[in-house]
Amino acid sequence: MGRPGGRGPLRIVSAVQVPAMIGLQVPPDCDFVADLIHHERDQAFGAAAARAAAVAPGVQVDTVPLSGPPAQAVTASGSGALMLVLGSRGTSAFGWMAPGSVSRYTAAHASCPDLVIRGETAAVHRQVGIGDLDACADSLAFAFEEASLRKASLMAIHAVHLPAISRAGDLAAIQADAARQLAGLLDTWRNKYPDVPVSQDVVRGHTGRALVGLSARADLVVIGRHAKHPVPGPGSVRHAVLNHALGPVAVVPSS
């Protein structure tokens, strides 16, 4: 994704919105509340920039306050970026925004790869997992590059929905055919990234469930997002992984 050596400038953004305080018996001073929120944001900016500088000395770090509805403002800030990174929950002391609402919105609408950090992974192996492999050229490119930069292996998962009435021989044939197709899909990328060890698995059932299980031992789970279906339903792979994964999740939009 055009990140030579894995380094690039970092822009830290924050969008705050003074809530509508309606129905309170004693309305607060709105200017005071706004000043308090902006003061908290500025402190968070300073702490985040200092931590980034300590973790990655020499990387250019800028802080940019945003205006407008937070979800839309943060998503728009990713235009032209190599990656948009968010936490899965807000960390503000104020509880006016629904937990995860910004990260869910960016995962559905960001124009660049969107990385949602869901706590600390317990992974002991350097591994990147990828699933939802239909129309997946962009997500495969992202996953292979991340694995190469992280010096990690890559596990590709494809799920097939097999009829319950199928015989054992039929099931084996269907899974074997899916495995051959998956291997063929990965061959091109193996040649482009010979330094990345690649394994694959064809599972029966829902891709999301398999990826959630993989997330317990992977540094990163990568899934694609179809441009024509930006909003996930409750049964979608993206919905399942964003809600239940045990580690970071990258959502890569198709071009």
Image: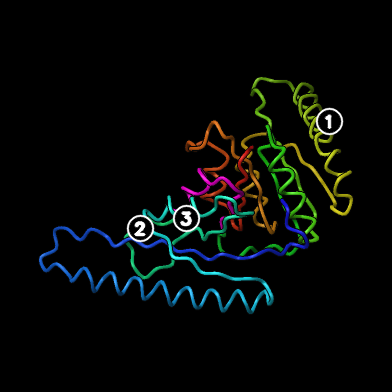
Q: How crowded is mark 1: few (under 14 residues within 10 Å), some or many (20 or more)?
A: few
Kindly state the secondary structure of the residue where label 2 is placed. loop
What residue would you read off at disc 3?
A: 74
Residue mark closest to the camera, 3 vs 2: 3
The residue at 55%/75% (across/down) is: 49
In this rendering, is residue 95 above or below 76?
A: below
In this rendering, is residue 207 above or below 101?
A: above
Q: Residues within 10 Å of mark 2 (few under 14, many from 20)?
A: some
The residue at 51%/50% (across/down) is: 243
Looking at the rendering, which quadrant does residue 137 occupy?
top right
- Is 1 on the left-hand or right-hand side of 176? left
Mark 3 in CB contact with mark 2 (< 8 angstroms) = no
Looking at the rendering, which quadrant does residue 21 occupy?
bottom left
Who is closer to the viewer here, 96 or 63? Answer: 63
Magenta range is: 102-116
Residue mark closest to the camera, 2 vs 1: 2
Q: Looking at numbered disc 1 in the image, what kind of residue is underneath it?
A: Arg
Disc 1 from disc 3: Cα separation: 41 Å
Kindly state the secondary structure of the residue where label 1 is placed. helix
Q: Does the magenta stretch include residue 42?
A: no
The residue at 73%/53% (across/down) is: 2
User: Of the residues under marks 2 and 1, which one precedes in the sequence?
Assistant: 2
User: Of the residues under marks 3 and 2, which one precedes in the sequence?
Assistant: 3
Residue mark closest to the camera, 1 vs 3: 3
Q: Looking at numbered disc 2 in the image, what kind of residue is underneath it?
A: Met
Disc 3 from disc 2: Cα separation: 14 Å
Tell me where residue 205 appears, x and y as whole percent: 64, 34
What residue would you read off at disc 2?
A: 97
Q: Looking at numbered disc 3 in the image, what kind of residue is underneath it?
A: Val
What residue would you read off at disc 1?
A: 180
